[in-house]
Image (cartoon, helix red, strand yellow):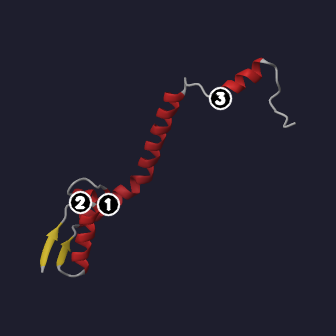
């Protein structure tokens, strides 16, 4: 049996990215070899600790990126024209009420 050692950054890259050399198929092939006992995978404790840290921080990182995206969209569209805002202005200047009648 052969044994392989996979460093944390390589393991994470293989699992999360589809860049050349890091395609998901590579991870599937590695899993097949390990499950078929053709390859022994040596997993250092630090790998588990690094993954645990990344997964613990992931929700905050996603929230931060979403907030940045929302801010960028709001900033990019703050001076754009749209029908709803135009109607609000028309109704406000013409003295219409805030509620529209359907009939």
* Marks 2 & 3, CB-CB < 8 Å contact: no
Q: Mark 2 points at which residue?
A: 8
Q: Where is residue 45 in the image (x, y as percent from the top left)?
A: 24, 67
In the rendered image, the residue lying farthest to the front is 103
Spot occupied by residue 72 in the image (x, y as percentages of width and height): 46, 33
Q: Give the answer, above or below, for where 90 lies relative to 58.
A: above
* Residue on which disc 1 sits: 51
Q: Is residue 8 left or right of residue 4?
A: right
For residue 84, the mark is none
Q: Residue drawn at (21%, 76%), measured in percent from left and top?
A: 33
Question: Circles 1 and 2: CB distance less than 8 Å?
Answer: yes
Q: Please tell me whether residue 62 is drawn above or below residue 2 in the rendered image.
A: above
Quadrant where the C terminus is found in the figure: top right
Identity of the residue drawn at 71% across and 26% down: 87
| Residue density around tag 2, few if under 14, some if 14–19, many if 20 or more, within 10 Å | some
> Do the numbered discs 1 and 3 sit on residues whose CB atoms are within 8 Å?
no
């Amino acid at each position: 049996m052969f044994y392989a050692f996979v460093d944390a950054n390589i393991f994470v890259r293989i699992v999360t990215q589809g860049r050349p050399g890091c395609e998901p198929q590579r991870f599937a092939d590695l899993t097949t070899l390990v499950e078929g006992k053709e390859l022994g995978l040596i997993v250092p404790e630090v790998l588990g600790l690094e993954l645990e840290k990344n997964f613990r921080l992931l929700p905050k990182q996603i929230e931060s990126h979403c907030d940045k995206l929302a801010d960028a969209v709001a900033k990019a569209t703050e001076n754009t024209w749209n029908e709803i805002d135009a109607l609000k202005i028309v109704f406000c200047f013409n003295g219409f009420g805030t509620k529209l009648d359907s009939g």
